Amino acid sequence: MNFDFQQYPYPSQRTAVIANRGMVATSQPLAAQAGLDILKKGGNAIDAAIATAATLTVVEPTSNGIGSDAFALVWTKGELHGLNGSGPAPKSISIEALKERGHEQMPTHGWIPVTVPGTPSAWAELSKRFGKLPLKEVLQPAIDYAENGYPLTPILGKYWDYAYKRYKEILTEDEFQHWFETFAPDGRAPKVGEIWKSPGHAATLRSIAETNGESFYRGELAEKIDAFSKKYNGFLTKEDLAAYKAEWVQPIKVNYRGYDVWEIPPNGQGLVALLALNIASGFEFQAKDTLDTYHKQIEAMKLAYTDGKAYITDPKDMPITVEELLSEEYGQSRRNEIGDEAIDPSPYQPPRGGTVYLATADGEGNMVSFIQSNYMGFGSGLVVPGTGISLQNRGHDFSLNPEHPNALKPGKKTYHTIIPGFLTKGTEAVGPFGVMGGYMQPQGHMQVVMNTIDFHLNPQAALDAPRWQWVGDKKVQVEHSFPNHIAQALVQKGHQIEVTVDTGGFGRGQIIWRDPETGVLMGGTESRTDGSIAAW
């Protein structure tokens, strides 16, 4: 039978998933099941998160890979921990070096935008500090899928084909040929339902598992990355890799109507979501689908994002502190700028004086919010020969203007888009949440949090609700299911509304909430992708 897996002419409904012994929510059914298998073998939520993340590098390579970066928020024993698995720029790179090569801005593909990948170190750190099972056992499901293959799912096949057609046109140099050998071995992208496997990927995961990540940074894999970089005049070296380790950080938060909303601190852009919620907290929202609600949400996000892009970078280079930006004084100052008409925001002037997402939970109360990404699809377009390691292009966000806070410097971490979220109330965990997708992420976080707290939507409904996305100036994109009468009314307020047919740009989220009295888990998964929840 010949099916079209991209056409779904009739509306369907997903309901929230309820369980109590364990839950894994992510964008790929096979990865969710891999995490659940680890839970059933005696692993905890942290082990399940690592297993799911590693499997996602195999079963959703269109969004992440072994050469990705990663961030995590981990709730265990009544405390929330943050892990920053983003890497710095190579020590040998500089604005001057790039300008000597003729670059006026950071390229999108090739070696220049590749920073030190943080994902393998993030897996190892999580496993060492909080895991119950050996990393070798936790990574085995991912190794099996890479070695034996799996059939492509519909949304995965869509973006794989899109990337292949685009790369075929623009990535014609010799350094990119290993991407085609790995991800288009038959001279085309694999189709939905076809089996794809990557023996090199399996061997790399096995090496990482057997050495607790050491081989990637100080062993055989580091040597292969270094040799590939040297061959094509890249800046990344084995010395850069050897100096790296994922960093434990203190999460940041705002209190929103009695709930604490948590994010990873800069260099991540989670601060943007908190800024927007801090601004919105001073308003009363009577109902979700009203003109007043959407107008104020959009205006608050515009102001928050303008400030985020102006100031978020490596913390040591930020010209204003996180505490100042999250203060009530800041929130009130920005709130006062919101009126009846859409505005063109300019950055806040400080007083003188910053993908794949998954959530896991187990029956013991441990919960993980985890995200990893190559940034733009497959990333840099580079695959280290014979390894299956696709390298991210995270350095693309660096500015080559030396006066900008996010200006490129050797050893500096760039503004980072991927952000895991977490919700608590008092001393109790409510649970992990996230919405992946570039600059949509803080906007998705704000909408999901407000859908939950202000409008009392269950986790599946909170994700299913039509989304909006501010894209610059007064331009706002809305999904085709967005209420038309409200879109028309927003136009009357000066917003430039664009209704989009494809929902792919509006993010892909997961939620797991926990009832503190019963321990019952309630999950929602994204209807805009191949999302799935595995539970028991």
Image (cartoon, rainbow, N blue to C red):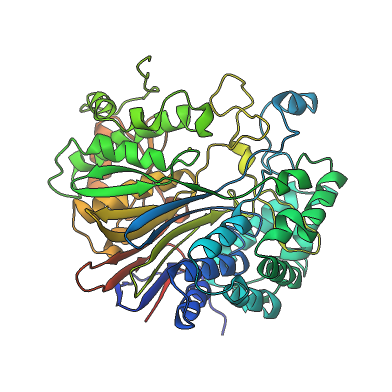
The count of marks equals: 0
Specify the farthest residue to the top. 352
Who's the residue at 30% across and 48% down the image?
Answer: 261
Q: State the image quarter where residue 353 is shown.
A: top left
Who's the residue at 47% across and 76% down the image?
Answer: 43
Specify the farthest residue to the right. 231
Q: Is residue 405 left or right of residue 107?
A: left
Q: State the image quarter where residue 442 is shown.
A: top left
Who's the residue at 27% across and 60% down the image?
Answer: 430
Q: Is residue 321 left or right of residue 462?
A: right
Rendered view: 307 above or below 533:
above
Q: In front: 455, or 154?
A: 455
Q: Position of residue 318 (x, y in %)?
A: 49, 27
Q: Is residue 199 visible?
A: yes
Q: Is residue 304 left or right of residue 69?
A: left
Specify the farthest residue to the bottom. 1
Q: State the image quarter where residue 334 is shown.
A: top left
The quarter of the rendered structure image containing the C terminus is: bottom left
Q: In front: 373, or 366?
A: 366
Q: In front: 259, or 164?
A: 259
The quarter of the rendered structure image containing the N terminus is: bottom right
Rendered view: 529 above or below 447:
below
Q: Is residue 482 visible?
A: no
Q: Position of residue 327 (x, y in %)?
A: 28, 30
Q: In front: 359, or 302?
A: 359
Rendered view: 252 above or below 53:
above
Q: Position of residue 376 (x, y in %)?
A: 59, 49
Q: Position of residue 352 (x, y in %)?
A: 38, 14
